Amino acid sequence: MLKQNAATFGPRAALLSDGSEPLSHQELWDQVTSTVTALNRLGVGRGDRVAIVLPQGPDLAVAFLAVAAGATAAPLNPAYLEKEFAFYLEDLQARALILPQGSDSPARAAANSLDVPVIELTSGALGTGRFQLSGSSRALATSGGFAEADDVALVLHTSGTTSRPKRVPLTHTNLLASIRHIRATLQLQPTDRCLNVMPLFHIHGLVACVLASLGAGGSTVCTRAFVAEEFSSGLERWKPSWYSAVPTMHQAILAHTQTLRVQPRESSLRFIRSSSAALPPPVMAGLESAFGVPVIESYGMTEAAHQMASNPLPPRGRKPGSVGLAAGPEVAILGELSETVATGRTGEVAIRGPNVIREYPNNPEANATAFRQGWFRTGDQGYLDEEGYLFITGRLKELINRGGEKIAPREIDEVLLTYPGVQQAVAFAVPHPSLGEDVAAAVVLKEGAGVSEASLREFVLDRLPAFKVPSRIIFVNDMPKGPTGKLQRIGLAERLAAALVVEYEPPASDLERRVATTICEVLGREAMGRNDNFFSIGGDSLRATQVLTRLEQALGFQIAVPTIFRCPTPALLANALDLMRAPEIDALAAELEKLLPEERARLLGNL
């Protein structure tokens, strides 16, 4: 595809980014070619799995494309902890790890512990997506050169019902099929430009925003990181014809847009796309009102190389609440015996087609569950209406879909159970206004154990990424069980609904009131109690940044982003901020002591 694009679209822009000259389709192909040669020199060839841990931006996009062209790319979330990097590197049996030159990422320590060679990427002032690779030369263990259609291009991991993530191998055939499907659904042309705000370690960003755009001969703007407040200026500068995002991002963009004096209805956008989690109908309506273009909701998953169904572009009808029509693979609703059920009846959503993987490697249990009679069973529950539109009604599996991140609850259970004093622990999904689902946990304590919710959350935060940490941990005397004695995870949110409600208690200090007021301003709430959890009442990582930015401006000192994850209530956050500003006050007092009495009095009077 990239070679053909170079011949057809040569000098036209392929990838763009702030502060650099665009990378043309010809230059992209040249960079991919030189990178494959470099990888071969460093002992990496066809079929070798290469983990990529790079910051968001054009280097990551090109590194993915180049590694996939000559080996197998495995981009990983840079926010992982060392033990998680160690798991993924070992599970991948990685031939190498690509890191920015000089990076102190915990991935380096993990690679060193497993004797995985590190390849360093140097970009410097070379421009958008132009970089060099360096490392120790090794002999090839496989053949060199470019990959073929049945070679695995991309490996991602997706959570299963157990705590062990499943490896998902996507071949070039899978990816090319998905590119064709997305191009056809969105009617992409060489003149289209995507403003990519999605992380490029996620199937959504990699396939929809990068590969589909390039597959149409168009271009993609590779943003460094998503900041809602910068979105409008990005529209103005890059003149994109579309963007795709998860609902959390759309909500942040809409909230910021609504604060602008001039609404951006005259933007260059042709349409807006949403995927990876359910888009609330009011958000869809708000985006269409603000930008004056249709919002297309799609349905995808990693095992299908992203897209499975999508609402069509006008003039065909879009149905709010539906993920649309089959958009590439065949979609069916199956009963318990894998039989096709009648229109309008609820069952399990299943798919089959050229974009769908054939199996999970070395995972016979998962394969026996997911692959039946030629169908891949998604684990989602839904129905098809008379016009073929698909509606998702729930999950048959226990996975928690937190804003597009699929989380295996057992992983959280296992961490909680290592805390002294915890006898039983069950993590489960709870509804969330912006993320769709959030994480909560029910805990049974051992007799006589004195454990607080805050101490448990702190414990989990030290062992799991923040997005996997329960926003609420509630203590119960007994855990609901089924007829066979198995702990009941599904439906736990409904059973424990009353316990999840926090009794309102007003803020108890000026700083608590400032924190509560700031959170209310960001979330559009009228009131917040001192013990209300920011994430439980509608907060997410994007809004957390907005809260901290406003508090920094008001208090005059910097606040580390993890602070709000460790201290998610006004009471806890105010206490943490008090401790942070104490050194600032001590330093000011020391300076005042050096002044003459009359000058000190004058300054104190002005404070």
Image (cartoon, rainbow, N blue to C red):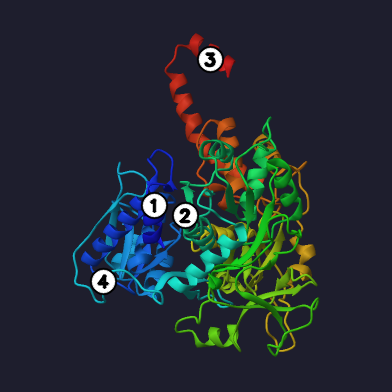
Q: Badge 1 local density, few (<14 within 10 Å), some, or many (20+)?
A: many
Mark 1–mark 3 Cα distance, whole angstroms, equals: 62 Å
Query: Across the whole image, how many numbered discs are drawn on residues?
Result: 4
Sequence-wise, which precedes: disc 4 or disc 1?
Answer: 1
Mark 4–mark 2 Cα distance, whole angstroms, equals: 27 Å
Mark 3 or mark 2, whichever is nearer to me: 2
Q: Which mark is residue 25?
A: 1
Residue 192, how many percent across, how many down?
54, 49
Q: Contact, CB < 8 Å: mark 1 with mark 3? A: no
Q: Which mark is residue 157?
A: none
Dot 1: element: helix
Front-most of residues 82 and 456: 82
Three-letter code, disc 2: Gly
Three-letter code, disc 1: His
Q: Contact, CB < 8 Å: mark 4 with mark 1? A: no
Residue 92, how many percent across, how many down?
39, 73
Mark 3 or mark 4, whichever is nearer to me: 4
Three-letter code, disc 3: Leu
Q: Which residue is mark 3?
A: 603
Horizontal relation, residue 432 to residue 176: left or right:
right
Q: Which mark is residue 217?
A: 2
Mark 1–mark 2 Cα distance, whole angstroms, equals: 8 Å
Sequence-wise, which precedes: disc 3 or disc 2?
Answer: 2
Sequence-wise, which precedes: disc 3 or disc 4?
Answer: 4
